[in-house]
Image (spheres, rainbow, N blue to C red):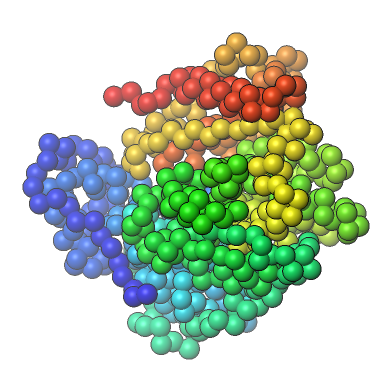
C-alpha cells in the first residue's frame, strides 16, 4: 500500500453559504496560525482558496482541535486543527514522544505501529514512525496492514513502551484515527491519556516537531510475518473443545466478509487452525480498500453493510456469517435459521459466548475459582443474569473497551483475586483471554464458530441457543438509537445543551413509568427518586446518564466519544410470557416507544 495524503478540494464557485461571518475569533486565530507558520505551500493555498469560496469548510475544520475520546484521535481527513492530517498526526506523536521520555525508565523505549486499509493510514503510520525515530525511540512498523488486536498483542509480545494504531474503525471512508496503547497492550487511560494530551497541547508549531526524512533510519524496524505466527499460536490454546473442533469443524459452513478491511489477513488462517476450514468469502468485500466501494459505512452493526454477506449465506446455505470491521476489532454475526438469514446484535453475541464459556468450563471442571467477567454499563443485563446463574462475579465498566483493558491490567499487576476470562460490550466488541487488552474480532469469531458448531451438532442454531437462554432467564431485549449531528461546532454545542438540559431537569417518569434511579457518571452520583438519597459512583467520570425505571427498563444517554452522535440505549426484560416470539416483539416495541419518548424529551432534531 502506497503512502498518501488526502485533502478535500474546496468548490470552484461561490455558494450561498459562503460568508466569513461563520468564522469566530478562535477559528480565525487557528486559521491565521496555519497561514503564517511553517506549514507547506499546498496546505496554505488550500486554506486561502477555502476562505474565498467556502469559509464554512474552514469553520468546521478550525473551530477546535481534535481531542482524545474513548478511541483516541478520530476525525475527517483534511486540512485543519479539527482534522486528521500529517500535522495533527505528527504533533500527536511528538507529544507522545515527550511523554514516553518522561515516563519510561527504559534505555531503549519503543513503539509498535499498525494501520488499517484506509486511504491515509499507511501515510499516517509512516509519519508517526519518522517522528518517533527523530526522538530516538525505536519503532516496530508493520510491513503491511494488520488488525488492531494484533497491535495490542504485539505491544505486549515485543515489550514495547507504547503502541499506535492508525484506524477509524467502522467510520465512513472520509474518517481516520489514531489510537494510542500503553505497555500493557491496552488503550491509554488515566493518567496516561491526560498526560499525553497535555504534551500534545504544549506543541504550538510544526517547528517543534522532529522527524527523520525517511524510513531508512536505524530506529525504524519493519515487522515481518513472524508476529502473525506467534499470535495464531497463542489463540490456539483458547479453545474449549479442541478435539471436537478438529474432528467436526469442517461440518460448520461459514460465510465471511472483512468489509474491505484487515480481517482477511489473519481470520481465515485462525479459523482453519481451529478446524473450521469450510469458509466461503464474500469476494466483493474481501479486498482491502479504503473507499469501501460496496457499503456506505463498513460497520457490522449496520444491516446494509451485511447485505452481501447475507446473500452469500443464503446462496451457499451456510450456517454462519461473520463480518469484521476494517480494523478487525469488532464482529457481526448472521445465522441461517429456519431458512432465513437472521442477524444477531452485539448483546446477543455477548451472552451466547458467555453462556458457552461458563457451561464448557464448568462441564470440564476447569472454571477457575477466581474467574471473573466484565461488561460495559450499556451492555445487556442478561450478561449479569448469566454470571449470577454460574455464581461468578461480573464487573461493570464505562463504555469503551479501554476500561475493560484497564481492569485486566489492575487485576494482573496489583495481584487482585480475580482472573479475567471474557468481556464484552453491546457494540460488537469482545475479548476471550488476556493475550490482548482490546476487543478482538479474530478470537471472538473463532469462539463464535465453536458455539455454532456445538449448536449444529445438536441439530440447532445460535438462534435456538438464544431462545433457550430467554426461556431460562427471561426475554431481554435492547435497542440503540443514534441521534446524528454534524461534525461541526454547531453539532457539538447542540449535544452539550441536550445533556445540560437532561441534568438540570431530569424526568420523573417515561411513558408514565416512574424513574426509580438516576445515575450521573459526570457527577459520580446515583440518586434514588423514592428515598431522595444519593450515593457515590466509583467509576471514572464520564458524560453518561442512566435512568432505571420501575419496570426494570434501563435507559442510557451519552454523547459518542468518537463520532458526532448522541447515543440512546434502552434495555428491558420480560419474565413471564406465553409465546417467545410475541414476547420478543412486545419487548422490542417497548424499547422503541421508550427511545422515541427520550428523543422527544431531548428536543431532537436540533432547532433551526
**In the drawing, does residue 335 fall left or right of residue 128?**
right
> Which residue is most to the left?
13
Quadrant for residue 245, please give it: bottom right
Quadrant for residue 217, please give it: bottom left
Residue lying at 50% horizontally and 50% vertically, measured from the top left = 314
542 vs 591: above or below: below
Residue lying at 60% horizontally and 44% vertically, measured from the top left = 337
Q: From where the camera sits, is residue 185 visible?
A: no
Quick one: 318 or 94, which is closer to the camera?
Answer: 318
Residue lying at 76% horizontally and 47% vertically, measured from the top left = 355
408 vs 161: above or below: above
> Which residue is most to the top?
512
Quick one: 184 or 307, which is closer to the camera?
Answer: 307
* Quadrant the C terminus occupies: top left
Quick one: 520 or 567, which is closer to the camera?
Answer: 567
Q: Residue 575: x and y, percent?
A: 75, 24
Quick one: 116 or 406, which is closer to the camera?
Answer: 116
**In the drawing, does residue 2 fall left or right of residue 142?**
left
Quadrant for residue 21, please give it: top left
Q: Residue 107: x and y, percent?
A: 62, 82
Residue lying at 84% horizontally and 39% vertically, measured from the top left = 389
**In the drawing, does residue 89 fall left or right of residue 442?**
left
Amino acid at each position: 500500500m502506497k503512502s498518501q495524503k488526502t485533502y478535500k478540494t474546496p468548490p470552484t464557485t461561490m455558494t450561498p453559504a459562503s460568508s466569513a461571518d461563520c468564522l469566530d475569533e478562535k477559528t480565525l486565530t487557528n486559521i491565521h496560525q496555519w497561514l503564517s507558520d511553517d506549514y507547506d505551500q499546498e496546505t496554505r493555498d488550500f486554506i486561502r482558496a477555502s476562505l474565498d469560496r467556502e469559509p464554512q469548510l474552514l469553520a468546521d475544520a478550525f473551530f477546535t482541535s481534535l481531542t482524545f475520546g474513548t478511541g483516541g484521535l478520530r476525525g475527517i481527513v483534511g486540512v485543519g486543527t479539527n482534522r486528521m492530517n500529517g500535522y495533527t498526526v505528527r504533533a500527536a506523536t511528538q507529544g507522545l514522544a515527550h511523554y514516553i521520555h518522561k515516563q519510561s525508565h527504559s534505555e531503549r523505549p519503543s513503539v509498535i505501529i499498525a494501520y488499517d486499509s484506509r486511504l491515509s493510514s499507511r501515510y499516517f503510520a509512516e509519519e508517526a514512525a519518522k517522528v518517533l525515530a527523530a526522538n530516538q525511540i525505536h519503532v516496530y512498523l508493520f510491513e503491511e496492514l494488520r488488525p488492531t488486536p494484533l497491535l495490542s498483542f504485539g505491544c505486549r509480545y515485543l515489550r514495547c513502551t507504547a503502541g499506535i494504531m492508525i484506524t477509524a474503525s467502522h467510520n465512513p471512508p472520509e474518517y481516520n484515527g489514531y489510537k494510542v496503547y500503553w505497555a500493557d497492550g491496552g488503550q491509554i487511560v488515566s493518567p496516561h491519556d491526560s498526560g499525553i494530551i497535555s504534551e500534545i497541547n504544549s506543541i504550538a508549531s510544526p517547528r517543534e516537531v522532529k522527524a527523520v526524512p525517511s524510513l531508512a533510519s536505524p530506529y525504524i524496524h519493519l515487522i515481518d510475518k513472524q508476529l502473525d505466527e506467534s499470535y495464531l499460536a497463542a489463540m490456539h490454546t483458547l479453545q474449549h473443545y479442541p478435539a471436537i473442533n478438529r474432528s467436526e469443524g469442517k461440518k460448520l459452513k461459514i460465510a465471511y466478509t472483512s468489509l474491505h478491511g484487515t480481517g482477511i489477513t489473519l481470520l481465515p488462517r485462525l479459523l482453519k487452525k481451529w478446524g473450521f476450514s469450510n469458509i466461503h468469502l464474500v469476494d466483493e468485500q474481501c479486498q482491502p480498500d479504503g473507499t469501501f466501494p460496496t457499503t456506505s459505512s463498513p460497520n457490522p452493526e449496520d444491516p446494509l453493510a451485511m447485505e452481501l454477506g447475507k446473500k452469500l449465506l443464503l446462496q451457499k446455505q451456510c450456517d454462519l456469517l461473520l463480518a469484521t470491521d476494517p480494523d478487525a476489532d469488532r464482529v457481526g454475526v448472521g445465522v441461517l435459521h429456519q431458512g432465513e438469514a437472521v442477524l444477531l446484535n452485539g448483546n446477543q453475541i455477548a451472552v451466547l459466548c458467555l453462556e458457552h464459556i461458563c457451561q464448557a468450563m464448568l462441564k470440564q471442571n476447569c472454571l477457575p475459582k477466581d474467574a471473573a467477567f466484565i461488561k460495559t454499563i450499556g451492555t445487556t443485563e442478561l450478561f449479569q443474569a448469566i454470571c449470577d446463574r454460574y455464581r461468578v462475579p461480573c464487573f461493570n465498566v464505562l463504555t469503551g473497551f479501554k476500561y475493560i483493558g484497564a481492569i485486566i491490567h489492575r487485576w494482573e499487576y496489583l495481584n487482585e483475586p480475580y482472573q479475567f476470562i471474557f468481556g464484552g460490550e453491546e457494540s460488537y466488541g469482545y475479548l476471550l483471554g488476556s493475550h490482548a487488552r482490546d476487543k478482538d474480532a479474530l478470537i471472538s469469531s473463532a469462539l463464535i464458530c465453536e458455539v455454532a458448531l456445538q449448536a449444529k451438532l445438536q441439530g440447532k442454531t445460535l438462534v435456538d441457543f438464544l431462545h433457550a437462554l430467554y426461556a431460562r432467564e427471561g426475554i431481554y431485549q435492547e435497542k440503540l438509537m443514534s441521534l446524528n449531528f454534524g461534525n461541526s461546532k454547531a453539532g457539538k454545542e447542540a449535544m452539550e445543551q441536550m445533556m445540560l438540559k437532561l441534568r438540570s431537569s431530569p424526568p420523573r417518569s417515561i411513558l408514565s413509568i416512574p424513574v426509580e434511579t438516576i445515575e450521573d457518571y459526570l457527577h459520580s452520583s446515583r440518586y434514588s427518586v423514592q428515598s431522595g438519597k444519593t450515593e457515590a459512583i466509583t467509576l471514572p467520570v464520564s458524560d453518561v446518564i442512566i435512568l432505571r425505571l420501575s419496570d426494570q427498563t434501563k435507559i442510557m444517554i451519552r454523547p459518542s466519544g468518537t463520532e458526532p452522535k448522541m447515543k440512546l440505549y434502552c434495555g428491558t426484560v420480560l419474565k413471564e410470557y406465553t409465546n417467545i416470539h410475541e414476547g420478543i416483539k412486545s419487548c422490542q416495541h417497548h424499547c422503541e416507544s421508550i427511545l422515541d419518548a427520550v428523543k422527544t424529551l431531548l428536543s431532537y432534531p436540533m432547532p433551526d
